[in-house]
Image: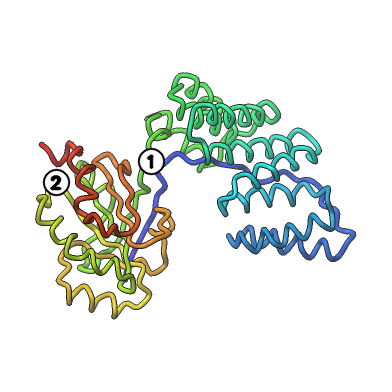
Amino acid sequence: MKHVALIALAAVVLTPGAPAQSVPNSNPAFTEQFEAGKRALNDGHFKDALGALKKAVKLQEDCYACYTGLAIANLKLGDGKAALESCDKAISLAKGDSARAYAHNLKGQILLSKAENATQLEMAEEEYRMAVQLDPAAAAYHLNVATVLVRQSKDEAAKSELEACMKANPNPEVAKTAKMLLADPRRGRETFAPDFKVRTLSGEQASLQQFAGKVLVMDFWATWCPPCRESVGELKDLTKKYPAEKLVLISVSADKDDDAWRSFIEKKHMGWLQYRDSDHQLLDAFGIHGFPTYLVIDGDGIIRTRIVGLNPQETVVHRLRATLEKMPQLNQ
């Protein structure tokens, strides 16, 4: 039986549960749409949540919870502008400091998710600090201020916020992240791979921690993906180019059909580590949305390169070469 366990290592932006704020329910049509949107949001069906909550606000324009829900749905769907507009509307409708703090924190999360320069990081910090000012007892808000400070390499200032977070009786998830950043602020600046433990096709157990000190290339693929099939030969070449004690290759398949997956691997003599991610836990954890996707992870667990799709003008090995040549683990 396959076994997979995932442990998040990268610092994450955490938002506590939405504060209690009465939702008008005198209109049955509104209540129906609001509850449908809330359920869809909780289930991760963000398009459905967006549609239902938009209908709800047409029936009840002063619904704070509708706008925070719309902000989250838009954020998850990649529409940052709409998410920010929904946050601003929620801030204007908030009743009480707790509700305003939640909306400001959510706005900070949206800004941080899109931040590409110092000015945008400062904007996110401003929103997070507003949340802390309004609700200083919320440990997650202190953690979020620390997160954006670390991103700006303001480690001493971040340490003060992390200590404040730990004093505010954080839940286990918040406490774990705060302790991680206190121990190694770099984890807030780099893109660390989530840890994983899987049982491979050959029965071996493979984990990120097991490959510490080595370069790990992760190949996310499927037998029904033509470019993935075309890359098999180049991946074989990659295993021949670098010694196994320095570079590890693991192919993670999205196939639902176990027989088709096993048959293809046997036919193509794919002798390296193979794992079929039938429940998509690894695919979701690594944010894989296209095939093939290649990740290069260094010996410290930092994702150094992400390559999506094949380029007919350039081979996989060639596209990886620039990254691999810079890896100290491969040049010692």
- Distance CA(mark 1)–CA(mark 2): 21 Å
Q: Quadrant of the C terminus?
A: top left
What residue is drawn where x is 69% and y is 31%? 135
Query: Label 1: how many residues lie within 10 Å, few (<14), some (14-19) or many (20+)?
Result: some
Q: Quadrant of the N terminus?
A: bottom left
Residue furthest to the front in view is 313
The front one of 239 and 312 is 312
Q: Position of residue 53 (x, y in %)?
A: 73, 58
Which percent across, then down, holds residue 275?
A: 28, 65
Q: In the picture shown, does residue 217 fall above or below 132?
A: below
The amino acid type of the residue labelled 1 equals: Thr
The percent position of residue 99, horizontal first and vertical second, equals: 74, 39
Q: Residue under label 2, please give it.
A: 246
State if disc 2 and disc 1 touch (CB < 8 Å).
no
Q: Which residue is mark 1?
A: 191
| Position of 195 relative to 200 (above/below) | above
**SS class, disc 2:** loop
Name which residue lies at 21% across and 42% down.
322
Give the residue type that dot 2 points to: Lys
